[in-house]
Image (spheres, grey):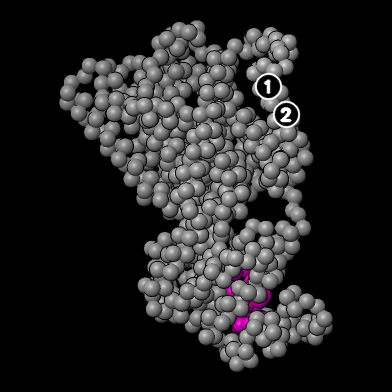
Amino acid sequence: MEKKRIKNSRYITGIDGIRTLAVIGVIFYHLMPSALPGGYLGVPILLVISGYLVTDLLRQEWQQNDKISVLKFYTRRLKRLYPSLVTVLVVSTAYITLFQRNLLNNLRGSVVSSLLYVNNWWQIDHGLSYFDRFGNESPFTHLWTMAVEGQNYLIWPILFILLVKFVKRKDRIFYILSIGALLSAIGMAIGFTPGEDPTRVYYGTDTRIFSILIGNALAFVWPSTRLKEQIPNSAKRILNITGVSSLLLLVLAYVFMDDRFSFPYYGGIYLVSLVTAVLVAVTAHPGASINRWLTNPVFSYLGKRSYGIYLYQFPVMILYEAQINVANNVWLHVFIELGLILLCSELSYRFIEDPLRKFDYKKSWQKIKNWFYMPLLSKQKAVGIASFVVVAIASIGVTIAPNDAVNANQAEFQAEIQENRKAAQESKNEEEQAEEDSEAEQGQENASDENILQTFSTDTDHVMEKYDLTENQVDRARNTDLTAFGDSVLLGSTQNIQEVFPDAIIDADVGRQLYDSVELLQELKDDGDLQENVVLALGSNGYADEDQFDDLMDVIGDRNVYLMNVRVPTQRWQNANNELFQKMEDKYQRVTLIDWYSLSNENNQWFREDQVHPTDVGRVEYTSLLAKEILE
């Protein structure tokens, strides 16, 4: 039965070209999000392809055999997907166990959920964000996609049988699946809230299944084995124009459909899935030319290895960038990472995917027995022993991996963030702030022998000594109206800033980016909390662009703006953002650039282990620089 099914199938070479388009988008979205902000749309492209091909094969099997072997379907999917998945999990976990144990936290849950194809729900349950480019470091974040596909593979063959047995008519099945896809897309739109993290609707099977359902529906009305190669020239022309148009639309979506916009969640990703279905349909038609145009050695090579490329992209990027400061020589590191991803995917395809897809598991026990009698210096013996060692190390890592562990430095940092968040909130209430200042003065008297770095007080001598300021500067600071708006770097220095500028209003939060700041600034303005002098300290968490900054300046109006640049050596957006900020100082006369990067870059001791958030010493230097620029 298996041979008959494969014999009657038609391999559509152009699909490899579409897969190549998809994985290129995903990889560059992660490596260079500012260059390809819509590259994440490669995921729905892959899901539509998966839905179409799997359902097309199921239809062929049903027509040839009048039944579906569900068990054999599961076996085929596992042989195709599981060996590479297990390999990337084992190898990455072994590496983390040996060389990067800071990533062991919650590793067990991540690995187990990936093996069970429920990683998307596990990440949702643990409050992890796909869009936190800075704080959510995990080599397995991207495996949420595999979970959505795996859940579909588990349920779909059973639903397929029920549909063809009881609904029967292809057009009705098409409508049912199309309505299901539309309801899923509506669920994404309803669940999405502008300004909030969209991870729940981005990860959820219920809100992402529409891409697969669209592919499933297409297979019922556009079966690959029933399409005629000989068609009128006019029909061929229409197909070719339609195919090229859909391909161009996908490329445009890559360039313009930024994940920071609301449109993707209000139907944008759904529309991309529909456009993908059109491209797949035209590519699958033997009478059109698109299949030939998308068939070439490069696309065929990358398309066949697209699964491995997708699997290894995140482990390579996360593990590489944890050891190398990629902010300098960005393109060099992009090429190195691309090379490593391609190398890993080639090794996976050559030694894991292709051999195990053809592996006869019924004879595996005999092969295992024979292995014990092979010479010690044989290739098979060496590979077996090395594999056992890697698996053993990975097993130790999974066993010892803590759950939601927080080390002493992290606990201290979290406590500081909470204290500063409270202080920032109280800065918007004059009465509470006055009380806080009074308590701080008293605290200075009671803690005069403590380290000056940990002591907070608005006492003139204390502020002068701590921040290297003159008495005149301290006096002027007390009469300076100031609003400071920014991310966690600014938030961590809230109490320091309030020592120098007691009446300063601080609005800062963890993970904040330029693109989600316009409405927040407008709220400050509407509440009367946007003072004459405004400090902007953004750009640590992701790429910024000129349009976003212009929108901020429209809200700020003619106020004086002090723009703090960033030091994020482990992220490739550091230099790009700092260059943008320099450009903005040149563009706006009322903008003064504060060069935190140049002052701090050679002083690693000023920072915590993440090399971004300042320590006590760093926060003093940060505040001193800020104060001197404002009071100059």
Amino acid at the residue labelled 1: Ala
- Where does residue 58 sit, x and y in percent of width and height? 46, 18
Secondary structure category for the residue under label 2: helix
Q: Position of residue 320 (x, y in %)?
A: 58, 45
Occupied quadrant, residue 571: bottom right
Instruction: State whether residue 118 is above or below residue 228.
Output: below
Q: At 36% across and 19% down in the image, what residue appears?
A: 224
Q: Residue at x 71, y 13 (%)?
A: 375
Quadrant position of residue 423: bottom right
Q: Residue at x 74, y 42 (%)?
A: 401
Looking at the image, is 224 positioned above or below residue 293? above
The stretch in magenta equals: 490-508
List x then y, in percent, for residue 562.
49, 76
State how far apart marks 1 and 2 are (Cα).
11 Å
| Residue drawn at x 67%, y 16% as measured from the top left | 378
Tell which tag, 1 or 2, sits nearer the viewer.
1
Q: Which residue is mark 2?
A: 389
Label 2, residues with CA under 10 Å away: few <14, some 14-19, many ≥20? few
Residue 424 in view: no
Circle 2: residue type: Val
Horizontal side of 111 relative to 591 (left or right) equals right
Count neighbours of disc 1 (C-alpha within 10 A) and say few if under 14, some if 14 to 19, many if 20 or more.
few
